[in-house]
Every structure is written in structure tokens, then in C-alpha cells.
Amino acid sequence: MPSSPLPLDSFDLAILAILQRDNATPQRLIGEAVNLSAPAVQRRIKRMEQTGVIAANVAIIEPAAVGQPITIFVEVELESERTELIDAAKRQFSETPEVQQCYYVTGEADFILVITVADMGAYEALTRKLFFGSNNVRKFRTFVAMDRVKVRLTVRLPD
């Protein structure tokens, strides 16, 4: 994440909009779409990668296609909110492959997790490891997704 916001001009925003739709778009085509040369597009993309505006270049995989059809949302409430225990929970959740996303939040819950698993047996085993096996988890609530209505990683860009 950038330490201070990088000033983005209309060219940068147009490039980001294209990359969010399809990160494999050739720089030549991006240049044609935004009225820049391919080398200028390349320089701008490299700068945005180096400054953290572009955090990663990844493929978005359909979980069911790779044997992980169940998406689960979990609210986790900790016993203690001491800094070292929160940091330990962050590390554990970050290192767990089934945890697709982890948010440290305000409110009753301390964390919201998005988890993908093959079946409920796999989720039960994960709860034993992450929640029942931790002295710092007070309680957790599970919400099983019935349908993936909208899943995107795009960020709304300024006009």
C-alpha cells in the first residue's frame, strides 16, 4: 500500500480501468485505447507497481473449478485485544491457505474472514485448528454462502 497517495492523472486512471477488466491486455492495445505509446503505458504501469497502486498481478480463479465450491464468511471475536494477540491472530489467518480474505474490523467482531473449502468436513477441521485450538478466540459465527451473486476485486476509480 502506498505510504502517501500517488497522484494519478486521467491516463493512469484509464490504464487502471483497462487492467482491472483484463490484466492480460497488451500494452499496445492499452496505449491505443488511452492515446499513449506502448512504452509510455509500460512506464506508467511499472511506476504504479513500484509505488503500490497496483498491488498484484493475479488470475481470479473460480473456486468450484478447483474443488473449493463452498464459500464461508466467519465473524471472529477475540478474548483479549492486546496488540501481540491481535498480531498473532493476523499472522495465523494470513498464513492459512483456506482463508481467502481477512479483515480486522470494528464492532462486535474483531475479524471477518472469507474462507473457501471443499466441503463442510474440511471447514469443521479448520474450525478446530483456527478457533477451538486458540485460547484467544471467544466465539465465532459462520455464514455459508448459498450463491455467489457478485464477486469482483475491482475498485471504483474516480471519474
Image (spheres, helix red, strand yellow):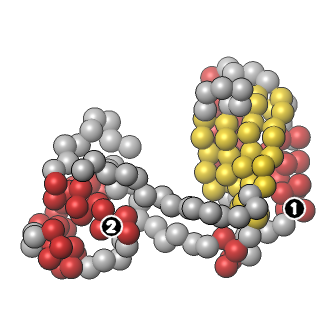
Q: Look at the image and tell me whether residue 88 can be seen.
A: no
Q: Amino acid at mark 1?
A: Met
Q: Tag 2, which secondary structure? A: helix
Of residue 48 and residue 19, the one placed in the foreground of this image is 19
Q: Which residue is mark 1?
A: 120
Percent coordinates x, y for residue 145 in the rendering: 74, 58
Kindly report the distance in space between the C-alpha atoms of the residues bearing marks 2 and 1: 36 Å
- Can you say whether 3 is above or below 155 in the image? above
Query: Would you place residue 93 above or below residue 109 in this image?
Result: below
In the displayed structure, would residue 57 be above or below residue 105?
below
Q: Nearer the viewer, residue 116 or 55?
A: 116
Query: Residue 104 location in percent, x, y?
Result: 60, 35
32 relative position to 18: left or right = left
Per the image, the residue denoted by label 2 is: 19
Residue at horizontal 89%, vertical 55%?
Answer: 124
Where does the image place residue 149, in percent across and percent down from the top left?
A: 62, 63
Image quadrant assignment for residue 139? top right
Residue type at mark 2?
Leu
